[in-house]
Amino acid sequence: MSARPCRICQHPTQGVNDFGRMPLGNGFLPPDAMQGEYFYHMQTAFCPSCHMFQLVDQPAAEAMFNEHYHFFSGTSRVMAEHFRQFAELVKSRYLSEQPMVMEIGSNDGIMLQHFAQAGIAHLGIEPSSNVADAARARGMNVISAFFDDALAAELVQQYGQVDAFLGANVMCHIPDLDQVAAGVKRLLKPRGVLMFEDPYLGDVIEKTSYDQIYDEHVYLFAVGSLTTLFARHQLEIIDVMPQTTHGGSMRYVVAHQGAYTVSEAVHHQREKEAALGLHLPETYDRFRQQVMQSRDDLVALLKRLKAEGKRVVGYGATSKSTTILNYCGIGPDLIEFISDTTPIKQGKLTPGMHIPVRPYEAFSERWPDYAVLFAWNHAAEIMAKEQAFVQAGGRFIRFVPRVEIL
Ligand code: SAM
Ligand code: TMP
């Protein structure tokens, strides 16, 4: 399918999924702005040489990350606690006596705030100015820019080198990772670390969570595929820590080659990846089949419920749901609306399929028969607070790891 060279090593890639015409994952739009909506062709590919799983085409960064960015990190209490713990780990393990911390994709300051509050010198690098403003308003030091090697050179001049360079759910957004790795190499103190986490390819393959594939996620990483990239810049992965967030993520700790002993966890994870077959083309053939099956099962279920006259809504207008809705062809005929607590999304339509996004109250004031859990990665938090809906006979539908009524 795809003859495009690998974005990391330039080897010819093997096409995996063809999701067809796709809008921006976070491209929620006002009802009067449907004309001229942006679409691209969303396809994925696997590199048989360095094993990176990647998007064939990705929209321009400025089209996705700008002053209208729709994702505010602070909407989940569980994620707020997760990032508090992440910051604690950095503080307890990796800071010197004169600490300096930088974070890319710092968004509304969900993690950076813990360094700012502790009086630690810090800098957020966040190109989406609306979310960056939210952090600045709370006293954090943030610049609005896309991180690359040229910016890193300026930052070293202005701030010196860093103890910790952090990123959560942002590295997998950046197509030119050589720029990032070169910049990080320049910025790290001799014992400095890059710590970042992103949705993990192993979980996506195991759970058929194909909604992790959307415009922003130009890569889905694994330890194996990242190793090639970092080695080119004399950097190495010294530790890995699996995370339950976003349906299964991996945190990577990277340092100058030889600066630290590589932990047993890294070797262990490599073995797990080999057992899962993340390096084998046939794994991705199977994944393609499973994605198509998942789509067919979800569409069949929603059509059956509609035929039975049930009210079905969505819970959480996620960027992930853009992939599900457009790939499966699910519109307002099958899902009445999607409720979401993010004010900037409310009153808008979902990208491409134009399902109305309503405030949480639209869900809670008149319970539907079924709610499709688009924010399935926050299932524990949502289930805990929606007991009354379930006790009243309401049912959640999920599609990861398989389509089922809970
Ligand atoms: N770190 C937060 C979290 O995990 O909740 C926000 C993640 S959000 C999905 C990705 C963020 O990365 C966005 O706020 C976006 O503007 C930012 N971003 C995208 N490309 C970037 C780049 N090249 N440099 C720095 N930040 C970037
Ligand atoms: P995410 O899966 O990319 O983190 O996005 C989650 C979306 O779901 C975000 O728009 C906020 C919304 N949401 C709710 O509406 N209610 C909730 O209880 C939670 C946790 C998230």
Image (cartoon, rainbow, N blue to C red):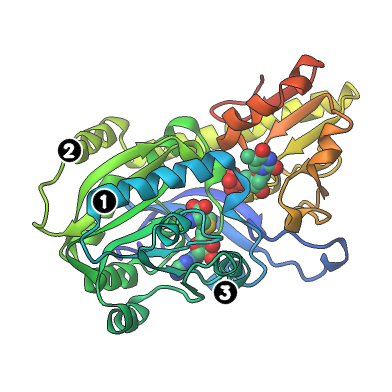
- Quadrant of the snapshot with the C terminus: top right
Q: Tell me the amino acid under the disc marked 3.
A: Glu
Which residue is denoted by mark 1 in the rendering? 253
Taking the spot 10% from the left edge, 57% from the top edge, the residue there is 259
What residue appears at the point 23 percent right and 66 percent down from the top-left corner? 98
Q: Mark 3 or mark 1, which has the lower sequence index?
A: 3
Q: Earlier in the sequence, mark 2 or mark 3?
A: 3
Q: Which label number is shown at residue 267?
A: 2
Neighbours of disc 3 within 10 Å: few (<14), some (14-19), many (20+)? few
Residue nearest the viewer, comparing 206 with 10 = 206
Between the C-alphas of marks 3 and 1, the distance is 28 Å
Q: CA distance from mark 2 to mark 3?
A: 38 Å
Mark 3, residue position: 62
Q: CA distance from mark 1 to mark 2?
A: 14 Å
Cβ of disc 2 within 8 Å of ligand 1?
A: no
| Label 2 SS | helix
Q: Residue at x 35, y 53 (%)?
A: 196
Three-letter amino acid code at the position of disc 1: Val
Point out the tag, 1 or 2, that comes first from the N-terminus: 1
